[in-house]
Image (tube, grey):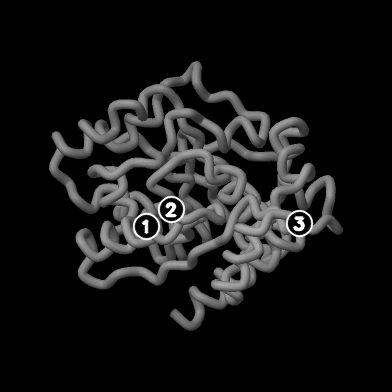
Amino acid sequence: MAVVAVYSVKGGVGKTTIAANLAWFSAMVSRRRTLLWDLDAAGGSGFLFGIDAQKRAAAGAIFDRDAEPASLIWQTGYDRLDLLPADNSLRDLDNVLTRIGKKKRLAKLTDTLSHDYERIVLDCPPVLNEISAQVMRAATCVIVPLPPSPLSARAFEIVAKEIRANTKRPPPILPVLSMVDRRRALHLQALEANPNWPVIPQASAVEQCAVRQAPVGAFAPNSPAARGFRQLWTAIERKLTNG
């Protein structure tokens, strides 16, 4: 089992779209039993699969009251891919984790879920607090979406620092250039400076994920965006194998 955390210190970088599509490729291409776990109270991952769990408001109980995660898991309609959606109860998750004082609560939960899933993809909120610290302790690999900009290097260093501060054995980090527009000079410079980083293009197919409420591989499998997600997932599997 491996826990793939898609994490950024800032919002608006394509984090949720990347997490949802990686989970789909894990299940449908690698054919692994996969769980997409949304830790962001906004519930974006659920929306992308047409699942509205807000009425339950019970996701936080997994951490606070030892509720069984399996009781909150939804089937997505895709083979081998399930979703543990977010809801408003996660808005207080940082305080809950701080209060209960169990620094490896998330890691223990993912370990329990490993009996049913080979890959767990975490859609993480853009925060620096006890939630991010627990994510780093649970993660086997951390994916960091970075839009091409002068601030990307700083954002990446913040993530690397957070990982070092909260883990004895830091998981490998895989930076990803997201929302890349090859018509823009700044984006081309970022591509030239980081030729080995996976790339997710800024494309209409990616935007259509929210409209269609489906991963891009399901409705545009031959698009540049689908190729980008496939290549990223291949790089992740390689990272998990080689470290």
Name the residue nearer the viewer: 173 or 10. Answer: 10
Secondary structure category for the residue under label 1: helix
Task: Please rate how many residues cluster around mark 2, counting C-alpha atoms within 10 Å: few if below 14, some from 14 to 19, many from 20.
Answer: few
Q: Position of residue 48 (x, y in %)?
A: 65, 35
Figure quadrant of residue 62: top left
Q: Amino acid at mark 2?
A: Leu
Query: Going 55% across and 61% down the picture, which residue do you hit?
Result: 176
Which residue is tagged 2? 151
Dot 1 or dot 3: first in sequence order is 1
Residue 208: tell me if it is visible: yes
Query: Going 26% across and 31% down the picture, which residue do you hit?
Result: 65
Residue 209, compared with residue 232, is above or below; it is above
Identity of the residue furthest to the top in this view: 55
Q: Amino acid at mark 1?
A: Arg
Figure quadrant of residue 187: bottom right
Query: Going 34% across and 49% down the picture, which residue do you hit?
Result: 109
Task: Please rate how many residues cluster around mark 1, counting C-alpha atoms within 10 Å: few if below 14, some from 14 to 19, many from 20.
Answer: few
Q: Which mark is residue 154?
A: 1
Name the residue nearer the viewer: 20 or 128. Answer: 128
Which residue is tagged 3? 226
Q: Nearer the viewer, mark 1 or mark 3?
A: 1
Left or right, 70 with respect to 100, comes to right
Secondary structure category for the residue under label 2: loop
Real-space CA distance between mark 1 and mark 3, rounded to the nearest whole angstrom: 28 Å
Residue 71, compared with residue 109, is above or below; it is above
